[in-house]
Image: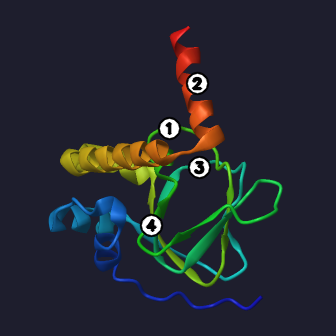
């Protein structure tokens, strides 16, 4: 497969469009733009695979990632421009539970855990605001969960209380 040259992305513009950062000030977005790195993922290649260590929050600046199960199979969902994937990676150690396959050429802006940890030291307010945005995003996703996922979460909570 031929390598496609990366498209230069205006990081601040792409991050400003992100749903996750809708409550951020321009200063906060600029701070994130300065520390985010750009990564190109060519059509038909994986941004990451299930089981790999997860240590990066990825903002999709261009393109579409298809989320597929560890063992392959039908697409579970898509992550498109303005969306993020991997937010929990900044908060807890873990691994990817699904793989992300580029449906077309994709441009990601990535914030590594190391960069996030440094931001906590140099820009604590921005780091706190991002942490709160990630928590709110997770809460909204969990609230919207239906069926087996919701039942599993209730079981997990009751298990902790026992």
Give SS at disc 1.
loop
Residue 34 drawn above or below residue 154: below
Residue picked out by circle 1: 92
Give SS at disc 3.
loop
Neighbourhood count class around disc 4 (C-alpha, 10 Å): few under 14, some 14–19, many 20 upward: some
Neighbourhood count class around disc 2 (C-alpha, 10 Å): few under 14, some 14–19, many 20 upward: few
136 or 131: which is nearer to us?
Answer: 136
Give SS at disc 4.
loop
Label of residue 83 in the image = 4
Of the numbered discs 1 and 4, the one sitting upstream in the chain is: 4
Residue 71 drawn above or below residue 78: above
Q: Is residue 118 left or right of residue 3?
A: left
Of the numbered discs 3 and 4, the one sitting upstream in the chain is: 3
Q: Is residue 156 left or right of residue 15?
A: right
Q: Is residue 2 left or right of residue 4?
A: right
Residue picked out by circle 3: 54
Distance between the alpha carbons at the discs numbered 2 and 3 = 22 Å
Neighbourhood count class around disc 3 (C-alpha, 10 Å): few under 14, some 14–19, many 20 upward: many
Distance between the alpha carbons at the discs numbered 2 and 4 = 27 Å
Label of residue 153 in the image = none
Task: Specify the quadrant that holds the N terminus.
Answer: bottom right
Residue 73 drawn above or below residue 9: above
Q: Are marks 2 and 1 in contact (CB under 8 Å)?
A: no
């Amino acid at each position: 497969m031929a390598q496609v040259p990366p498209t230069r992305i205006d990081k601040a513009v792409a991050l400003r469009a992100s749903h996750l950062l809708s409550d951020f000030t321009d200063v906060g977005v600029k701070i994130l733009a300065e520390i985010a790195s750009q990564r190109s993922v060519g059509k038909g290649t994986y941004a990451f695979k299930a089981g790999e260590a997860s240590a990066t929050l990825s903002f999709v600046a261009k393109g579409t990632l298809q989320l597929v199960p560890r063992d392959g199979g039908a697409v579970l969902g898509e992550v498109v421009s303005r969306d993020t994937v991997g937010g929990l990676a900044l908060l807890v150690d873990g691994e990817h539970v699904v793989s992300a396959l580029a449906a077309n050429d994709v441009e990601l802006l990535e914030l590594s855990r190391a960069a996030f940890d440094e931001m906590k030291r140099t820009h604590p307010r921005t780091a706190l605001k991002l942490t709160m945005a990630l928590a709110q995003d997770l809460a909204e996703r969990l609230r919207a969960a239906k069926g087996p996922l919701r039942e599993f979460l209730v079981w997990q909570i009751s298990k902790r209380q026992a």
